[in-house]
Amino acid sequence: MKEKKEENNLMEKIISLCKRRGFIFPGSEIYGGLANSYDYGPLGVELKNNIKNLWWKRFVHQRNDMVGIDAALIMNPKVWEASGHLKEFSDPLVECKKCKRRFRADHVNSKKCPDCGGVLGESRQFNLMLKTFLGPAEEKANEVFFRPETAQAMFVDFKNVLETSRKKIPFGIAQTGKAFRNEITPGNFIFRTREFEQMEIEYFIKENDWKDSFKYWQKEMWDWMTDALGLKKDSIHESDVPDGERAHYSKKTIDFEYDFPFGKSELYGLAYRADFDLKNHFKEAPYKDEETGEKFYPHVIEPTFGVDRSVLALIYDAYKEESERVVLKLKPMLAPYKVAVFPLLKNKPELVKIAREIYAGLKKEFNAVFDDRGNIGKRYYSQDEIGTPFCLTVDFESLENNDVTVRHRDTMAQERIKIKDLVKFLEDGIS
Ligand code: ATP
């Protein structure tokens, strides 16, 4: 019980830090907000972009067998008919007979309402597709849907990508972007919202290779979580999703769960979609083996990564309360600011001038920030709380020696570095 309270408390502290320091704000706040909608602020967008850029570099640029796309959010509704989403993309919904609140049936463990203890009614399927209309008339013919996953465009564009990229199986198509789901019970901050971002790969293979490919991507996902993001291994768990609980298209799914403050919950997923999607979209087999001339439907392994859940896991994983400070121990590569530059004293123009010059130079290479408010200790703590890995101070010695004090976020150790060596020092420290 005590533990649960502490974890709730921690979640509140993280939400408050995110708002106070400009990571994540409640959406439409000046109009009273919009339930479960959030805006990424100046630091949040940096963190999020750093995750997405790292992902793209690792899974697209650094590989020979991957290309990317950036498709429209709203697709022809026939896509969703063919993919089965209009019929099958639903969650079981139950309503409390007393307070009328609605819940996802698979998230409540008893027949009683978690809020008021009232009796829950029968469960029914609720479709999660978010509907809108294109054009001026709100009629059935103009009905369209915001995509509930980025995946389908990778299937629909399969032939175009194949013809223009001249890739051969095995190869993958990657995409990052927004997806929309009319979730029954959004909540837990940015963990479950109705508008969120995904990073997905559809990796096309021959049917016989699916088991090996699945294992390969399972390892790639582990390496991403633990090496690239630096999440604690002990906080990540795999869960093999049993028959009957998998999405309608999947023959095998592993959920990667993370120990969030509110409990163990899905961070990412890995699915074997077989040839389900390509078969639904293409009447004729869309792939021809150049050597054998055989035409066939490639099978697909799908590693999928939620961006917002990555942000939440990273902030939670990195958040540390130490005796005198709160520090976000993010990997330097992911930190919003890489370096902060301070003049020791605000009222000494000779120090301010050099600090400004250093700042202007570093800003060409790194996301840097300048601060001359309050005393040095306060500035350090302010940067610690947002995860800035290095703080540089220009002091009186700098005038003599052309160097600065570099203070390291995690160890709080300090050293002197020559001004001319700073770019190299930071490049090494960040990579
Ligand atoms: P859940 O069981 O939590 O509803 P899911 O199994 O439906 O998730 P997928 O369809 O596998 O999720 O979506 C892929 C990834 O997209 C998830 O692993 C997660 O990171 C992210 N995601 C899915 N739904 C949401 C949401 N409502 N808000 C934020 N991220 C989401």
Image (cartoon, rainbow, N blue to C red):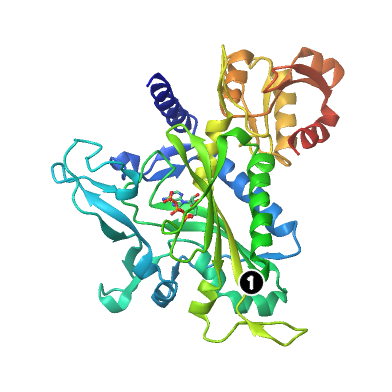
Residue 163 at x, y percent in the picture: 67, 80
- The residue nearer to you, when weighing 98 against 162, is 98
- The residue nearer to you, when weighing 266 against 242, is 242
Please tell me whether mark 1 sits on a helix, a strand or a loop.
Answer: helix
Amino acid type of the residue tagged 1 in the rendering: Glu
Q: Looking at the image, which residue is at 79% across and 18% down?
A: 415
Q: Is residue 352 left or right of residue 201?
A: right
Is residue 232 something that shows in the picture?
Answer: no
Is residue 69 something that shows in the picture?
Answer: yes
Name the residue that disc number 1 marks. 207
Q: Residue furthest left?
A: 98
Q: Looking at the image, which residue is at 22% across and 40% down?
A: 113
Q: In the picture shown, does residue 120 fall above or below 165?
A: above
Snapshot quadrant of residue 392: top right
Q: In the picture shown, does residue 125 fall above or below 97?
A: below
For the C terminus, the image quarter is: top right
- The residue nearer to you, when weighing 67 against 246, is 246
Q: Looking at the image, which residue is at 45% across and 51% down?
A: 196
Snapshot quadrant of residue 87: bottom left
